[in-house]
Image: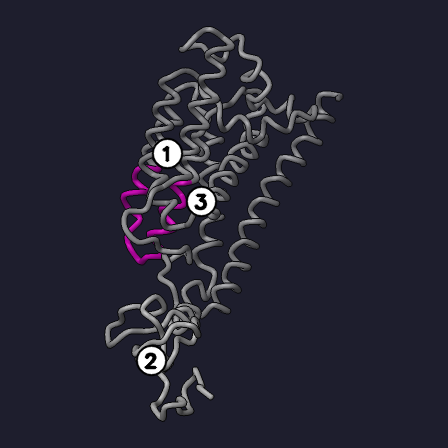
Amino acid sequence: MTNPGWGGVAGDGTPPQPRCVRHPDRPTALSCTRCGRPACVECLRPAAVGQHCVDCIAADAKTTRSARTVAGAPLRTGLPTPIVTYVLIGLNVLIYAITVLQSGNVANNHLGSPLFTSWALWPPAVADGDLVRVVGSGFLHFGAVHLLVNMFALWVIGRDTEIILGRSRYVAVYLVSILGGSAAVMAFQVNAVTAGASGAVFGLMGAQAVILLRLKRSPGPVLAIIALNVIISVTIPGISLWGHLGGLVAGAAATAALMFAPGSLGTPAERQKARTLGWGGLAAVTVVSVGVIALRMAQLRSELGM
């Protein structure tokens, strides 16, 4: 009886030809130089020495540490595309376009736009229960110039930050920065109507400063840009200083929690622990921001007799 495997002798006394371990119906003279098992051409891949079967390659992939950024995000080969940054820019432009269509005015799109009226950050309205303003205001803009300035800044700052942090962390830092900016406005700028992505942009500036510190590089250039923008916020009327500062602090704090968690570049178990600690720190920043907003809501309801 003929044995189609490794051992035995065919009926005519000649040894049978080995068959591929994954395809027993395929005789083969080839074998994996790593495990030595016979394999057909379809199941072999070129290697530095000889050729490896797909099973050995899959087993090696499970034990090999993948390349990651300093924040622990997967390091993609080639030229990474900052998809989230482009999506955020697109959302801001889309919402601006809607307010322009509603108002019929490119420069004064805040006048006569129901969307702008219902999303702009006005603390008394938030205290009355319009919570959508806390985040929605971060996607509104007063005119085309305001939009273009913020979107250019987001395009410049956001691309590298997204690649370092990874998409999910980047989105989280962006939204927490908006939340922090709104919390600061609720606390210190009660009578102003505020809108714009500036709080988020300032948060990304803070994130870049933290990233440079984690890379042991000088954050001086980023800090200089932050200082210049703070001066502009103070000297030019109509700019929300507290929205900028709140976004800056929240974005920097959230990024620090993600970047400085121990073990972010260690073994898989250490990386998992670092992710848990990092997201826990980011959640803490979120809780503080929400707590400030909730406290101010209660105070304003009492002060305004709501």
Q: Is residue 147 above or below residue 58?
A: above
Crowding at dot 2, Cα within 10 Å, few <14 / some 14-19 / many 20+, comes out as some
Residue 101 rendering spot, x and y as whole percentages: 48, 11
- Mark 2 → mark 3, Cα distance in angstroms: 41 Å
> In the picture, residue 87 is in which quadrant?
top left
Residue 181 painted magenta? no
Q: Is residue 142 above or below residue 82?
A: above
Q: Is residue 54 above or below residue 163?
A: below
Residue 253 horizontal side relative to residue 31, left or right: right
Q: Which of the marked residues, 1 or 2, is nearer the chain's N terminus?
A: 2
Of the 4 image quadrants, the one containing the C terminus is top right
> In the picture, residue 70 is in which quadrant?
bottom left
Residue 247 horizontal side relative to residue 286, left or right: left
- Considering the numbered disc 1 on the image, is that residue within a helix, a strand or a loop? helix
Q: Which of the marked residues, 1 or 3, is nearer the chain's N terminus?
A: 1
Q: Which of the marked residues, 2 or 3, is nearer the chain's N terminus?
A: 2
Residue 208 painted magenta? yes
Q: Are marks 2 and 3 in contact (CB under 8 Å)?
A: no
Q: Nearer the viewer, residue 24 or 180?
A: 24
- Dot in front, 2 or 3: 2
Residue type (three-letter) at the residue carrying disc 3? Tyr
- Considering the numbered disc 2 on the image, is that residue within a helix, a strand or a loop? loop
Residue, disc 3: 170
Residue, disc 2: 34
Residue, disc 1: 154
Q: Residue furthest front?
A: 12
Residue 148 rendering spot, x and y as whole percentages: 35, 23
Q: Nearer the viewer, residue 199 or 55?
A: 55
Residue drawn 71% across the image and 24% down it: 303
- Mark 1 → mark 3, Cα distance in angstroms: 12 Å
Q: Which residues are magenta?
A: 204-226
Residue 195 rendering spot, x and y as whole percentages: 49, 23
